[in-house]
Image (cartoon, grey):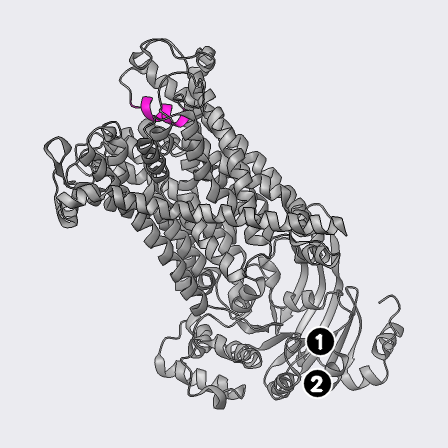
Amino acid sequence: MKKQNTRIILDKIFKCLMVIIISAVLLFIIALLIMLIRRSQLILSRYTIWELLFSSDWDPDKGLYGFLPAVTGTFFVTVLSLLIAVPISILSAVYISEYMPSTIKSYFQTFIDVLAGIPSVVFGLCALLVLVPLTRDVIGPLFGVKTTGMCVFTAALVLAAMVFPVIISITVESLGILPVGLKEQFLSLGATKWQLIETVLFRAAGPGIISGIILGFGRAFGETMAVVMVIGNKNILIPSLFSPGQTLPGIIVGSFNEMMSVPEHQSALIFISLILFVIVLFFNILANIIKNRLKSRWRYE
Amino acid sequence: MLNKDMEIRIRDLNIYSMYKNKKNSHILKNINLDIPKNRLTSIIGPSGCGKTTLLKSINRLHDIQENIKVEGHVFIGDEDIYNPRRQVNEIRKMVGLIAQRPYPLPANIYDNIAFGPRLHGKRKKSELDDIVENCLKRTYLWEEVKDRLKEPAVALSIGQQQRLCIARALAVEPEVLLCDEITSALDPISSEKIESLLLTLRQDYTIVMVSHVLRQARRLSDYVVFLYFGEVVETGYAKEFFESPKDQRTKNYISGIMPGL
Amino acid sequence: MNKYIKESIFKVLMVISVFIVMAYIVIIIGINVVKGGIVIINNPSVVFTAPGPKYLLGGEGGILHAILGSVFMVIPSTCIACVVSYLIALFLQVDYIKNNFSNKLRVVFDVLWGIPSILYGIFILNILIVTNRRGSLGAGIITLALLQMPVIVRYMDEALNSVPNGIRESAYSLGATRLETAFTTTKYALPGIIAGALIGMGRAMGDAASVIFTSGAGNSMPKGLSKSASSLPVLIFQQANSFYPSVREHAYAASFVLIVIVIILNTVSRISSKHFQKYTSGSGK
């Protein structure tokens, strides 16, 4: 009887422990948010949000904090990289899951996993060695532009490579869980394989694919190091895709040394972090809503 | 019995399943089979004897599975469907499949029926309307759904979904319908509706049905094939098959004494 | 014949896409292995020597400080993160709370996973500023632990989730408490749990954006918890664009070491989860 009691007490102790840890995690998120808001108050008290977001001058020494170059830079880099990555990754995911023989398939998935695990600085290094010269000597002249290679376009190319594994693995997974019976029924209506993929599988696997794309967006958007290494880090409104630019996370890393000294500068950087946090939060929630919506709309059973 | 009455002729069909680490198994052994035109043929036999495998081989559905190797010939009419020069989807168009459980397209009822004709290039609205109405009427679904053709197909009951799948298969004008235990997931009332539907359809289509339920096979079939561990043991028209089976194994199976099962 | 043409066009496009992805992988790994390999073969001592004077100006020294910094930072942080994540994953799995609520918690962890790693760095940095401290090895450990926690939680949760329900039910029916039942399922999910830990470790190993603020990122050997430390990714970031070729070579060598570590972690975790699959599919029937 005594042993019984200790077991139940142990059960209760662990329950308390877990509740404490979970609360700590939730507290961490709240603390993060509060800290970001409070510490960006300084800059917000001197400038309005509109002034910060829509002014294009960035010179902390003169007290100018315009985020517009970084905002547009982030936007172009992210969108361009997704434009490259989404079609390529979805097409290759379809090929991997529907056309590849299963023996090769598992090797290929290992490859994709390796790609997913490669640190972003390594991507950055590789981009410096390969993509920067490529853009400078081949792609730039092809479009008739003179460029150093350290530009928005190169950054988008690197980001695309980092988004591949995210979208591919989620798409392969969501195509893989579709029942064979579903395919059989539509094949026996006389559909060609591509017709089947286009009309049935994309819909049935749609929620998964779309959440993969949104996750890929999140990765591209928040990626810091690889982009900073190749984008050239100039706070100007980019005149073309082949000119150097700046991204929001890039500003933070680029000026982390000064961060300790000038309070106003520090506060501006923290305000940028707040923007990042809010956007990531927004897209995560959006991804969840879209996924659930589509799941009930594109139900196949 | 003339060759002309036979819709499907299966000659020397062997199917093997190949697994990397396991021993290859010989699922169907030297099947030679004739299935009569515009009749309902049942394939019966204990579970695991290859009934569904045989059924799918008539539709070349084994092509999408890597581990299965098919040898032999299946003729529909005069055509060898395993002829590599034929486009596989044209063959599948001639042979409709209705599976154990219905998978409606994630779309509305109308699009579900129109899906097949659209695949084959029919785009005209009036033409599609006709096909949809016709097929729904043939499956006695029209009265039930005519006011809500734009509602999602998954909202229908599972019995209705199964009939919708039959209607969808009819919309591409097949010659043969393959039914793989189509009533096993349904309640008795829905299965009865489907059974009576099959009885009306057999005038126009050659139906091949796999059934676990002996009584159902007895009720519905014109022609019966008894499959036992990958071999055809006995075939015959339903009446003589059930009343005077020739093989001992058939007798045992029909009377319910099957040693080792 | 139109649809057949469409099919072949898309097939060609798909093959091209697969080749592009393949090419990316091969180029990334290939370039780093070749460049880094050459450096290491020419001068193996790079890996074993600490940085000397005028290190960033092309002076003497190797990357030992970064390797040791990475190891000292990642291993403790993974241990902390594993313990915490395991308890969280159990909490999501064990029937202490309603399923609906644990699904909401899962969304929270997904959000945490999606936060750019630089934000973790900013958070810890602010705590450091408030408490008037400098970046140190200890702060780096805490940052990395926070960073990998959502990843590990997700993998552990999935691993525990795929244990067949029958095992849980039979444990309950033998009179086990919820905690004991949870420990029983852990045994079955162990390979998946280990895989999750290794993947989290890989993430921490390669992340520069968070530790660049918090670990001090100096060029000295790691000397203690409150002293500054460097790490491989930070070293790559700082030296890849250097003016001096000999400094750039440090970055190549570091990325070679980093890639080797990441690939090893990846392979081991894959083997581990394969083993896991065998486990569950065997008991599935």
The residue lying toward the viewer, choosing from B110 and C184, is C184
The chain carrying label 1 is B
Read off the magenta span.
Answer: C231-241
The residue lying toward the viewer, choosing from A47 and B77, is A47
Using residue B165 as the reference point, say whether residue B148 is left or right of it: left
Tag on residue B211?
Answer: 1
When asked about the image quadrant of residue B119, the answer is bottom left
The percent position of residue B235, horizontal first and vertical second, equals 78, 76
Mark 2 nearby-residue class (10 Å; few <14, some 14–19, many ≥20):
some
Q: In the rendered image of this protein, does residue C95 appear above or below residue B183? A: above
- The kind of secondary structure element at disc 1 is loop
The chain carrying label 2 is B
Per the image, is B31 magenta? no
Q: Amino acid at mark 2?
A: Leu
Using residue C106 as the reference point, say whether residue A217 is left or right of it: left
Please identify the dominant SS of the magenta region. helix
